[in-house]
Image (cartoon, rainbow, N blue to C red):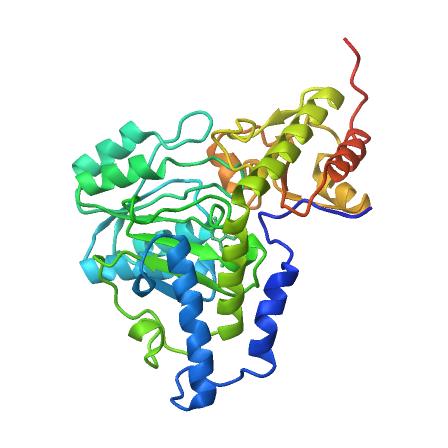
Amino acid sequence: MRVYFDNAATTPLDRAVFEAMLPLMEQQFGNPSSIHWHGREVRSALDRARKTVAGLLNTSPAEIFFTSGGTEADNTALVNSIEAYGLTHAITSPIEHHAVLHTLEFLEKKGKIRLSKVALDESGHVDLACLDDLLRHNPRSLVSLMHGNNEIGNLLDLERVGELCAEHQALFHSDTVQTMGHYRHDLQALKTDFIVGAAHKFHGPKGVGFLYVNANTRIHPFIHGGAQERNQRGGTENVYGIVGLAKALELAYDDMDGHHRLIESLKARMMARLRETIDGVEFNGDSAKLDRSLYTVLNVSFPASDDADMLLFNLDIAKISASGGSACSSGSSVGSHVLTALGTDPARPAVRFSFSKFNTADEVDYVVEKVAALFPKKELA
Ligand SMILES: Cc1ncc(COP(=O)(O)O)c(C=O)c1O
């Protein structure tokens, strides 16, 4: 058996998505900007894809801009809103994805903004009182807080943060890469200015994503060139990627509740089995709380051991793909900035197991058996 438990990094392409993309790679090769028949048929496919995505998110096609993925969508929202609105202050958290953190830190270093990082509680959730306080002292800020953390799975209350931002005339960007296709986003109900998606996180193709920009929010072109994406992003569109993204999101919405139940049961099984078999196993962030974390992510903290550095390597040898990284020990430049911010013990190795609809209970049992073999046998009570 070979097990893929790294679905927060990327997911396998769904067969039906591949089939939806194929005609665009074979017969329908026109440039969607061309006005002739070959161009028009591809333009229609592009328009349909935008309509599908907008429909699923309960918003209008004019608010969806296709990009090369989550990173570009995050960069576009952050750089653009600061520039278009002349904002001078941004608020984020220390556990954002680097697509957000590095972008804001770059803008801070350039002297374009002051950057504040909101405090977190002991399990890594945003301290909303601290956010409120920061907003009170810095109205008209840009707030960027992720919906689901890609390492520890912690979920943010998007509704509440949206309300707070609206109260203080702040723009609100949320990196929704890990929740897109796994949770429903009703953009009529949410008070967000920007959210993002990356197709490869929900069984779509790599290198394609989108940025939602609320119709009331102004942005400037991010990539200058042709008139594609309503003058906001020049360059011939990744048409097969976009068609694949829309198909993947459609499939995700078709049976979201079923997938949620299945994947959550795998996560719960894995937690229970690990607790049964390994002494001193813990879960990082709020990963163990099923209602406060992504059902797709389980971040496990293992007891310190002489082989701690070899854990992921040993899993790979046992034909298990997972990812991880402990907190940075002082002086070390590598490690997880998320676990470091949470103050987790750098001596304890951490592994992120992340699941998809293609995983099974047998795979969970196989992984637990192999992992348990790397640690001393648990004494029976
Ligand atoms: C939370 C989050 N944001 C942004 C990204 C970047 O997405 P992409 O690799 O599609 O650019 C990722 C991917 O790992 C992610 O998990």
Tell me if I can see residue 236 in this picture: no
Residue 205 lies, with reference to residue 24, above or below; the image says: above
Q: Quadrant of the C terminus?
A: top right
Residue 126 lies, with reference to residue 5, above or below; the image says: above
Residue 121 pos. (x, y %): 40, 26
Q: Number of marks in the image?
A: 0
Identify which residue is drawn at 52% across, 37% down. Answer: 294
Q: Is residue 318 left or right of residue 246?
A: right
- Residue furthest toward the bottom? 36
Residue 353 pos. (x, y %): 64, 40
Q: Nearer the viewer, residue 111 or 295?
A: 295
| Residue 220: quarter of image | bottom left
Identify which residue is drawn at 21% across, 42% down. Answer: 166
| Residue 46: quarter of image | bottom left
Identify which residue is drawn at 53% across, 72% down. Answer: 240
Q: Is residue 266 left or right of residue 216?
A: right
Residue 47 pos. (x, y %): 40, 71
Tell me if I can see residue 57 in this picture: yes
Residue 117 lies, with reference to residue 20, above or below; the image says: above
Residue 67 pos. (x, y %): 43, 66
Q: Is residue 223 left or right of residue 37?
A: left
- Residue furthest toward the top? 381
Q: Is residue 139 left or right of residue 69?
A: left
Identify which residue is drawn at 57% across, 63% down. Answer: 205
